Amino acid sequence: MALNRVSLAVYFTALAFFIGLEISALILEYRHLGINPLFLRDFSNYWGGAHILFEGDPLSVFDQNSYFSQLVALYGENYTWHNWSYPPSFLLFCAPLYFMGYHLAMAVFLFGTLGLFVFAAHRFVLEHAPDVAGGKSPWTIPVFTLLMLAAILCNLRYTQNGFLTSGLLLLGFAYWSRKPVLAGIFLGLLTVKPQLGILVPFLLLLDRNWLAIASASVTALALIAVSSAVLGVQAWLDYVEITLPHQSRIMTVFGEDQPYLTMMLSPFSGMRTLGINGSPAWIVHALFVIPALALGFWTIVKSTDSLSRFAALLIMSFVVSPYSFNYDAGVLSVACASLGLRYRARATQSGEIGILADLRFRTLYFLAVLPVASGLITELLFPVSPPALLFGLFLLSPLAGRLFVPAHRSGFSPAG
């Protein structure tokens, strides 16, 4: 199918619309709330945690009521509810923030980790999609940069750590084969937010990447050992016995009519936005997870293209993990935008190959802007992320290749 310029113009206008809404939301929130409440968001956890680490009892961050009362004392009585959801090792990452004022610390943290994210995306694309960038930085490609605005603006709006975690995962993928020990270090550091790497160990085992496995294991154990030495072993016991159960309640019980549910991308959270809770929501979640695992691992096993394999792994991870947020999806945006650019080039072809490539690039571009598109569509219509992610996996899988490009009629590799 030849590309239709009008349909492409409409499509890119829609993508730009979602990104424009994110910018507008920031402006409107600033006008309505003012600068202080606007930026007393998730970063306040990191800065507040650092102050408790140096000035109070570090174990109190795992007692949600005690922790929140200390944050209120730090930020004022109008401070909205926040809780500490991270393992003790993340407190070590936050420690340097103590030595800066709040707004300076936030600027250093956000733009410092943004620099890490930009560099990591650059290394990832050059390693796994050199054809897309032509040997240059992907950030010189206007479409790539436009699509990345979704993840960047989302993370800035919520003052989250998505740049850091996405950067670590992208660097782990970038050095996966070339420097497996270094890759393992980055993947081991990612254990400060373990749900993002939930399926990475399976790919490491599938690839028999023993050096990366060993390096990641040593790094993770070192983080546990150092944090235990600084905070005490009780910090990890409290994390397991108090924090994790509280996070489970946030995901499964709390949150009715709260905006954070629409920020989550999983099928389970999508059902909760529709008022479906408990076992029925878990059943629907499983109905997405089972085909996602089948399509994702089929694609990974059959594909010889590293970019397709990592994209499939990431899409699959955001379906499988019930606790995934839009601000964590920067790594997904990079992989999907890169692969989308590749398929857009293929979509200039005619015939059945063009149809599949066209569907792939449009879907992948949409997944790249999912951090800003999902919340609005979920609020106005339905939870779009689960079907969009599953459809993306289907299009990357050999099944789509067999339906659109019968093997006896083309030598094209559907998974590559």
Image: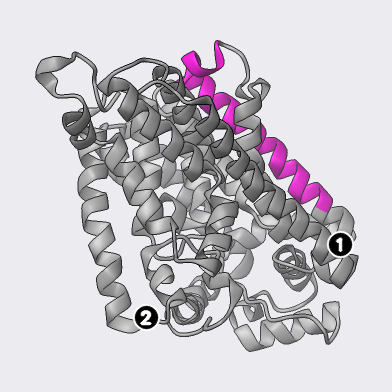
Secondary structure beneath label 1? helix
Of all residues, the one furthest to the front in this rendering is 6
Residue 73 appearing in the image = yes
Looking at the rendered structure, the kind of residue marked 1 is Tyr
Residues 275 and 263: in front is 275
Where, quadrant-wise, is the N terminus in this rendering?
A: top left
Residues 340 and 304: in front is 340
Relative to residue 297, is residue 275 depicted above or below? below
Instruction: Report whether 214 appears left or right of 336.
Output: left
Residue sitting at x 25%, y 36%: 397
Name the spot of residue 31 as percent of width and height, x first: 88, 66
Find the magenta span and give its range: 107-134
**Residue 102: assigned label:** 1
Name the spot of residue 408 as percent of width and height, x first: 9, 17
Instruction: Report whether 391 appears left or right of 363.
Output: left
Relative to residue 37, is residue 5 depicted above or below? above
Residue sitting at x 47%, y 44%: 367
Residue 225 appearing in the image = no
